[in-house]
Image (spheres, rainbow, N blue to C red):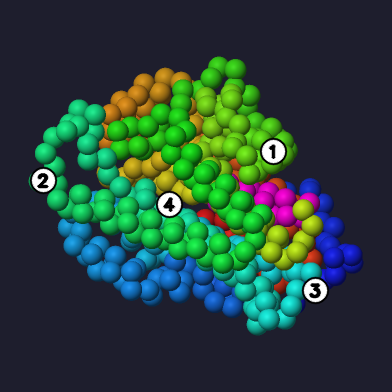
Amino acid sequence: MASHEGGSRPRYNSTTSGQLQEKLATRSVQKHDWNRAVSEAEKIVGYPTSFLSLRWLLSDEIANVALHLRKLVGSNHPLLKTAKTLIYNDKNQQAWGLIVLLVSKAAGHVANIPDMEQDKSAGVLHSQRALAEVTEMIRTSHLVHQGMLNLQSFDNAGNDLSGDSDMIFGNKIALLGGDYLLANACQQVATLRNQDLNMLISSAFRDLAESNYIGERDEQNNPLPTKPHPSAKDFATDVNSLEDLGFGDLEDNTEPMKIDGVVGNPEKEWSLRHILGGGSLLGKSCQGAMMLGGHPEPLQKQGYLFGKHLSLAWQACIDLQPFLLPKLPMGAQFSLVSAPVLFHLEHDETLYEEIEKGRKSVDNIDYTKVYQAVVQGPGVEKTKILMRKHSIAAMKVLNELPVNDARMALQNIILAMQEL
């Protein structure tokens, strides 16, 4: 176990920033396979941490939700897509509980924690394992809540909805199912009896809620990119420009993030959207794991930075996927606020005329036209730089932790992202 006294320092690796960049920029001789990296990481912490493996999934309440969900089969309710993504454990859905456990084990804990509070077989504390489950529950509840439809658009407000019984039923399941998971998460955090942790996770709740109010939206609350501001500074070509991407969270991350001058700046807007929409939760969960392990506040803050940068690197990797295909599949859509699109709009504002067609519904946008423009512009290459930038930042934090199998597993996950 990687536990150590608060006054003694473990042996650290002295890898330089240049070596980290070289490691990320070149493919290793043995290709890093994503599924293998995650599978080996799960063995290190003792058990699978995906949505289906959590204990609360076996409860009667969730079983009833799953039973009612079958009634939506055949409808077009977006909750079905969410359920499918969770059931098949799509690699685009980050295994955040696993990351929290790996960070917990990589950092270890102070030696004066009683034996009864330690899970010695996995090398983590029972409270850290509970926090990992809370992280998965909050993330899943957010995804489920997003599977709701606005059945009363502005033009049809007040109309009879009796003919949309499946859609109404789907909304009820999404609302109640998400609320159930969120309530359980709150209850589990409270049982840990740590006021500072409670404050930290509560601020992550707030950030998730605020993520739904950044920038323009269509009538179904699908996000639309903001027209780039002419004076926006281009950070994407500089892998060392991370200090320019703070939103007040580097001083006190329990306070609301500062958004002045962010909207209209492609990289800052992208970063803010995805920090609020998930990076804050992962970062604060990693910070909370350090807190539970008894580590000093500076190392706790490093845990936050690791989770935030890993989440952003992961999101950049996800954003890239549709634009690496030979052509866009028939009827396929992609996120209009993905990094390649935002960077291309900065390069060619004329494409924004197509984006504006989605004010009522994003379905009105010609995705093939947007796709063809983006793949021919600089957006894809800038997104690769963006992913490498945040990967290097996450690696730098790992370099401050003791050398052990959990740290190596986290490094392998970051490297495997480069191969997706």
* Discs 4, 3 touching: Cβ within 8 Å: no
Q: Residue 347 at what x, y percent from top left?
A: 52, 24
For the residue labelled by badge 3, is the local secondary structure a helix, a strand or a loop?
loop
Q: Could you tell which of marks 4 and 3 lies nearer the N-terminus?
A: 3
Q: Which residue is mark 2?
A: 162
Residue kind at label 3, given as amino acid type: Asn
Q: Main SS of the magenta segment?
A: helix
Q: Could you tell which of marks 4 and 2 lies nearer the N-terminus?
A: 4
* Discs 1, 4 touching: Cβ within 8 Å: no
Judging depth in this view, the residue of 144 and 196 nearest the camera is 196
* Residue 404 belongs to magenta span: no
Specify the segment rendered in magenta: 298-314
For the residue labelled by badge 4, is the local secondary structure a helix, a strand or a loop?
helix
Q: Which residue is mark 3?
A: 112
Between the residue at mark 1 and the residue at mark 4, the CA separation in whole angstroms equals: 27 Å
Residue at left offset 41%, top offset 40%:
335
* Discs 4, 2 touching: Cβ within 8 Å: no
Residue 142, label in figure = 4
Between the residue at mark 2 and the residue at mark 3, the CA separation in whole angstroms equals: 62 Å
Residue kind at label 1, given as amino acid type: Leu
Q: Which residue is mark 1?
A: 242
Q: Could you tell which of marks 3 and 1 lies nearer the N-terminus?
A: 3
Residue kind at label 4, given as amino acid type: His
For the residue labelled by badge 2, is the local secondary structure a helix, a strand or a loop?
helix
Instruction: Name the front one of labels 2 and 1.
Output: 2
